[in-house]
Image: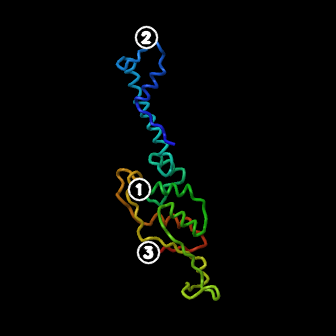
Amino acid sequence: MTIPNYSSADFTSALSGLLPRGRVWPRDPESVLMQAVACLAPMYERNCTAAIDLLVTAFPATATDLIPEWQETLGLPDPCAGPSATIAQQRQQIVARLTDSGGQSAPYFIQFAKALGYTITVANDAPFRCGQSRAGHHVGSEEWFYVWTVHAPEFTINPFLAGHSTAGEALGSFGNAVLVCEIESRSPAHTILQFIFE
């Protein structure tokens, strides 16, 4: 469904249609009455455009003006994003927090990282066991049951995107600081988390 966006001419026509009928209410565009009505129409057009913009910017994935409201609701910004996060990174963090259902499985962390804009894999290490492990498997002690590793690209680039980024932002940013911070804050307390950037 498309959102109707009315012009000044539409509002002028609608307002003139609301006026009473009679000789003292002329519909001639050059009359003082119709010029007064035409002066009001641009205000209604601006309000209509602002209302449509509000519908678009209220949604977290496309928010601009309401980012501070979303951040306050979700306890953001936090140390993970840092003070220089781009608008796109702030949106990603807001959407990731809103859609985060919690979990401790590898698919949960992979999906959460994807919502933040990162592509990762997760490996769970376990000690070598006779009869279960094979040649080439990791060899380690019982403590390796509690170690898990996140494999991520060495650099994750967040380019400037027309329609998503805003004027004044850098043409690109890179790094994995947000990923590390967010995953560490959700890592189960009894485990040891390692990151390998390849």
How many badges with numbers are in the image?
A: 3
Q: Between marks 3 and 1, how big is the CA–CA gap? A: 24 Å
Classify mark 2: helix, strand or loop: loop
> Which mark is first along the chain, 1 or 2?
2
Residues packed near mark 1 inside 10 Å, few (<14), some (14 to 19) or many (20 plus):
many
Amino acid marked by disc 1 = Thr
Identify the residue under disc 3: 198
Coordinates of residue 4 in the picture (x, y in percent): 47, 37
Residues packed near mark 2 inside 10 Å, few (<14), some (14 to 19) or many (20 plus):
few
Amino acid marked by disc 2 = Arg
> Which mark is first along the chain, 3 or 2?
2
Classify mark 3: helix, strand or loop: loop
Identify the residue under disc 1: 86
> Hey, which quadrant is residue 109 in on the image?
bottom right
> Residue 23 — which label?
2
> Hey, which quadrant is residue 33 in on the image?
top left
Badge nearest the viewer, 2 or 1? 2
Coordinates of residue 87 in the picture (x, y in percent): 42, 53
Foreground residue among 115 and 27: 27
Contact between labelled residues 3 and 2, with CB atoms less than 8 Å apart:
no
> Which mark is first along the chain, 1 or 3?
1
Q: Quadrant of the C terminus?
A: bottom left
